[in-house]
Image (cartoon, rainbow, N blue to C red):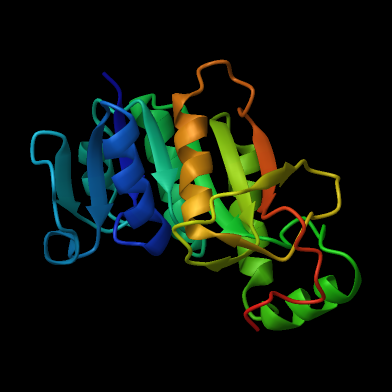
Amino acid sequence: MKTILILGAAGQISRYLIVELLKQTDYKLKLFARNASKRIKVTDPSREEVIDGDFNDKRALDTALDGVDAVYLDEMRDLKAVENIVSQMDAIGVKKIIAATVLGVEDEVKGKFGQWNNAMIASSIERRKKTAAVLKKSDLDYTQLRLAWLFDDDQNTDYELTQSGEPFGGTEVSRQAVAKLIVNILKDDSGKYARKSLGVNEPNTNFDKPSFY
């Protein structure tokens, strides 16, 4: 039985991911977040372990990583935090990580949407490029998800993927679709997602900006 560590387990994507992993797999889940015990409601105590912690606390990360088969990181905003996570994974010997970031970290968003997106994320894109570089330079079997603009829709779990070097495919994608993709990656043992940076969007959403803006 696999054990999955979800870093940022109180995040919006993580909440959908937890539900789907409990439904579709027999995996045990370690749910790591600041004030996790107050923010996360456990529905299956036999499979869910809640851990209060901070990404910059190496001792807490070591404890959380013990016995883990794979990691999902809900956010790559903080450079020092990402460096700590990669370092502690190396130290413990955990190889597989799926990490969510924003579209645009590879300058892959073109046209009018690219111009709109660059303006919207201008204040944070350079920092996120640096965190993406930390992952790429590591020896981990990472899968980086460059996510289109996010919304919630339980009935919409369609997604499509683009590879590094390809133009980004669309403007938006549901958090439920992203959770579905993460489950698929975690269940895959072939290695086809290893050391990949994937653009993630809903098919047929080639708009000048997301439909909800």
* Residue 98 visible within the image: no
Which residue lies most toward the top here? 190
Which residue lies most toward the left here? 45
Task: Give the image location of residue 53, x and y in percent.
Answer: 22, 56
Task: Give the image location of residue 127, x and y in percent.
Answer: 62, 67
Which quarter of the picture shows residue 48?
top left
Residue closest to the eye, 173 or 182: 173
Q: Is residue 16 above or below residue 35?
A: above
Horizontal side of 73 relative to 126 (left or right) equals left
Q: Quadrant of the N terminus?
A: top left
Task: Give the image location of residue 183, x and y in percent.
Answer: 45, 36
Residue closest to the eye, 211 or 201: 211
Q: Quadrant of the C terminus?
A: bottom right
The residue that appears at 82% across and 63% down in the rendered structure is 109
Q: Is residue 65 above or below residue 6?
A: above
Which residue lies most toward the right here? 111
The residue that appears at 73% across and 53% down in the rendered structure is 203
Horizontal side of 119 relative to 141 (left or right) equals right
* Residue 81 visible within the image: yes
The residue that appears at 41% across and 48% down in the rendered structure is 84
Task: Give the image location of residue 114, x and y in percent.
Answer: 82, 71
Q: Is residue 150 above or below residue 119?
A: above
The residue that appears at 24% across and 63% down in the rendered structure is 34
Horizontal side of 49 relative to 58 (left or right) equals left
Question: How many numbered marks appear?
Answer: 0
Residue closest to the eye, 144 or 154: 154
Residue closest to the eye, 96 or 10: 10
